[in-house]
């Protein structure tokens, strides 16, 4: 099935698509050189929003779930990329321990089954070690497609983590550690722990990521001779917000105002007749709960107590005081009538696939990563990963996806910079 | 379209398929470790024959054509593998010079267009430098699918090879140099020349390749606990055959007899009720012209003058005196009623695709790489590259293709050993 994409077929993004297609060898070489200097995250997914006049990543996930939404055609690419990753990290490895999110719904477990399959095909015995106290013995769980996953209790030795009779060389985390780093994962110096603990939300800050992305987009803009704003969402941050008091919102108010003014100026420069908006999110948490679309500073003053409570509480129940105020990027993509945003999946340095996240009940300026969202696989009649030179900009789904893959990789590169900057072990070297 | 495969669904190869599927992590790790010690050829295609009771590579091509027969789904895998190859060889490269076979038919030129596309997508400006004296200026040639290729005259400097205003870091050969190594390709020490000149037929010997393959198959057999004969075609060689005289055929006669006896013994061991046969080929040439199926030593005595002349003349018109006598492997695969053999394509260390070569007018014990053959793409409903554990042996096309990919990679590994052993520069180091 080919998703029917209704994208904004005019405006700067079509020019950008054209520019990106013409520059394929230049872009690929640029990435090649970047990856000589910087290590890509182990795996990454990036939410991209396409406003027609602007195309930007809005969320970079370093512990991506949803691998089960990739189409069968994409899996060999993921396997090949996983092979390349393993060759670099631990070529002698026989086994890999996958530590999942502490979630038991079958959607998430299907994601684990897909990851397990990918790494098995890449040449590793893969087993799942659960962080849950409830898993005290190997527990088989049936999945809707007839397959199974087995969760097993983790066993921690003095220096190593494994399962009963299973001592892996590499541990892959599929949990973003929102609830904090469990002690069982700390001080593992003999095994590869991927991604590293400081890629989890206890350490990560969205503002650090988007600062790195700003730098990446400036360099990429220079490479292609284009305004980096076309791919870069502006942002401000507040380090001390108190959602429980009016006074505590002052930083949020002033920064929102300043950002809206900046965006308005940019819209004017490009003759864009849309109303600017910003998105307020917890600086140190995953998307979903504490995300608020603000179209006017007055919106902040008019926050209901319920909305305040929601914004002030993180995913793991902690109090949110650090927020990022990000330029909102409309998504003009639709599948049927539902608002859609593409999600790009990467393994090591390679784009291996993606899908559309759609939400029938949300607007084009709202967060789609929320209950009620669903997924439409990107299954193209022709290969999705490869551009088709010569096709009119905006008219070719593969060409569009190639561009999304470039943006996804720019965000991944920013994550690589970010992880270097926040690496606690690198600091010790200074 | 899914090709309807009629394969021999009983016998040892189904057990082998089962064994190979169960051993995926072990096999992939084994290859991983091999590639730590040995460099894979730049690209490789391997003809595989499946007799139901035996599965073996019969030809390993280090300058594969036919890339245009890969399906669109396979191209992203080739691109990703090409990216991995370039990263290792010459990450700073901006451009690549492709030197094709001196052939102008549109089938071959479509192959070049596909290779050009693959390397372009991997991030290189690719141009075609012709060895033909007739190409004195850039020459555009239209292809049946509406695309074009441009052949350009090579320009040789003292130390480098390129085109006008095009000085590449890497030169990829798509010619097997059957007619000898052109002087223009010699003494290029500043650029990467891939595959190296000694991978061409002036240096290569099939006997050296299959000697290396024998070694590889023994080690693989040990790994999986199976008789390496199941995947290894036995062979003898004759260094001095004179097809123009009866006396000159004595070596061929005695070796054929000895080999047929060996094969008969193996058939008896496995209870195989087929008539053994051998295939006689020039030791130093590509398939096609001088290939002869011999079912009985008497066949050699009864050779017609025409057949003798054909066997005694190599592809480039030279006299053939070195031959390899190889155990013939039946192909029990059929597409509709035509005899079929799978061809596996690899880029760097990765299996990226394949197709079936079929020939309606040839028998199951004959060479199919001959005029009149055609190609059936391997387009599966489900991904062809990945096995499906749990499916009955012989019943799953993807599982079968995974096995072919393993055999293809064993032959590629043998080619890697072979190229190491015949490397003229490595000898200088001793």
Image (cartoon, coloured by chain):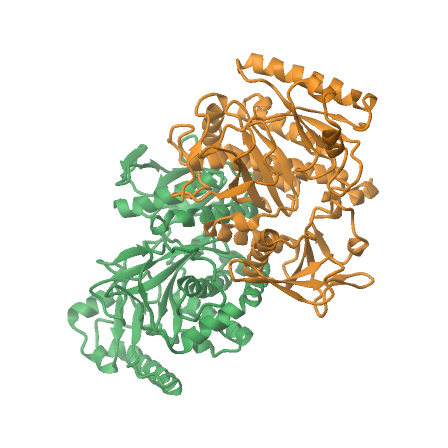
Chain colours: A green, B orange
- Describe residue A285's horizontal placement relative to residue B271 as left or right: left
Q: Position of residue B372 (x, y in %)?
A: 57, 40
Residue A56 point in image, percent of width and height:
40, 70
What is the residue that sits farthest to the front in this orientation? B305
A107 to B16, vertically: above or below = below
Q: Going by the image, does B71 lie left or right of B205? A: left
**Quadrant of the snapshot with the N terminus of chain A:** bottom left
Q: How many marks?
A: 0
Residue at figure coordinates x 30%, y 60% from the top left: A357
| Residue pictured at 27% horizontal, 36% vertical | A142
Residue A297 appears left or right of B231: left
Please tell me whether residue B174 is drawn above or below residue A292 in the rendered image. Answer: above
Q: Residue at x 38, y 47 (%)?
A: A72
* Residue in front for this viewpoint, A48 or A138: A48
Depth check, front residue: A118 or A6 = A6
| Residue A372 located left or right of residue A202 | left
In terms of image quadrants, where is residue B136? bottom right
Position of residue A368 measured from the top left corner of the image (x, y, whole percent): 27, 63
Q: Is residue A61 visible?
A: no
Instruction: Judge whether residue A139 can be spotted in this image.
Output: yes
Q: Residue B421: name its quadrant.
A: top right
Residue nearest the observer in this picture, A65 or A393: A393
Residue at the (55%, 29%) spot, across then down: B363
Residue A401 image-quadrant placement: bottom left
Q: Position of residue B175 (x, y in %)?
A: 69, 49
Quarter holding the C terminus of chain A is bottom right
């Amino acid at each position: 099935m080919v998703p029917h994409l209704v994208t904004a077929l005019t405006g700067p993004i079509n020019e950008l698509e054209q520019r990106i297609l013409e520059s394929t060898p230049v872009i690929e070489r640029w990435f090649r050189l970047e990856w000589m200097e910087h290590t890509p995250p182990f795996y990454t997914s990036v939410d991209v929003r396409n406003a027609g006049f602007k195309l930007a990543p809005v969320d970079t996930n370093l512990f991506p779930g949803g691998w089960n939404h990739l189409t069968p055609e994409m899996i060999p690419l993921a396997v090949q990329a996983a092979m390349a990753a393993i060759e670099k990290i631990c070529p002698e490895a026989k086994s890999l321990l996958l530590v999942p999110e502490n979630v038991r719904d079958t959607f998430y477990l299907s994601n684990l089954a897909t990851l397990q399959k990918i790494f098995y095909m890449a040449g590793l015995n893969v087993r799942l070690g659960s962080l849950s106290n409830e898993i005290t013995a190997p527990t088989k769980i049936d999945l809707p497609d007839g397959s199974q996953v087995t969760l097993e209790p983790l066993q921690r030795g003095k220096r190593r983590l494994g399962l009963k009779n299973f001592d892996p060389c590499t541990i892959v985390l599929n949990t973003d550690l929102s609830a904090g780093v469990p002690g069982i994962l700390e001080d593992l110096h003999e095994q590869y722990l991927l991604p590293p603990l400081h890629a989890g939300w206890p350490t990560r800050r969205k503002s650090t990521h988007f600062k790195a992305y700003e730098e990446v987009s400036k360099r990429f803009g220079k490479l292609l001779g284009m305004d980096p704003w076309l791919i870069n969402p502006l942002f401000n941050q507040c380090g001390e917000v108190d959602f429980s008091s009016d006074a505590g919102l002052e930083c949020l108010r002033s920064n929102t105002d300043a950002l809206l003014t900046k965006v308005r100026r940019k819209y004017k420069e490009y003759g864009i007749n849309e109303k600017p908006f910003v998105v307020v999110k917890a600086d140190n948490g995953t998307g979903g709960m504490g995300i608020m679309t603000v179209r006017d500073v007055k919106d902040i003053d008019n926050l209901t107590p319920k909305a305040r409570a929601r914004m002030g509480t993180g995913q793991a129940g902690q109090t949110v005081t650090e927020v990022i105020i990000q330029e909102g990027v409309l998504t003009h993509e639709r599948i049927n009538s539902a608002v859609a945003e593409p999600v790009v999946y990467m393994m090591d340095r390679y784009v291996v696939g993606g899908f559309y996240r759609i939400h029938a009940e949300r607007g084009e300026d709202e967060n789609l990563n929320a209950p009620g969202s669903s997924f439409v696989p990107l299954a193209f009649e022709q290969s999705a990963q490869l551009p088709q030179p010569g096709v009119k900009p905006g008219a070719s789904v593969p060409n569009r996806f190639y561009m999304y893959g470039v943006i996804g990789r720019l965000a991944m590169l920013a994550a690589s910079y970010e992880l270097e900057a926040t690496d606690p072990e690198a600091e010790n070297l200074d």
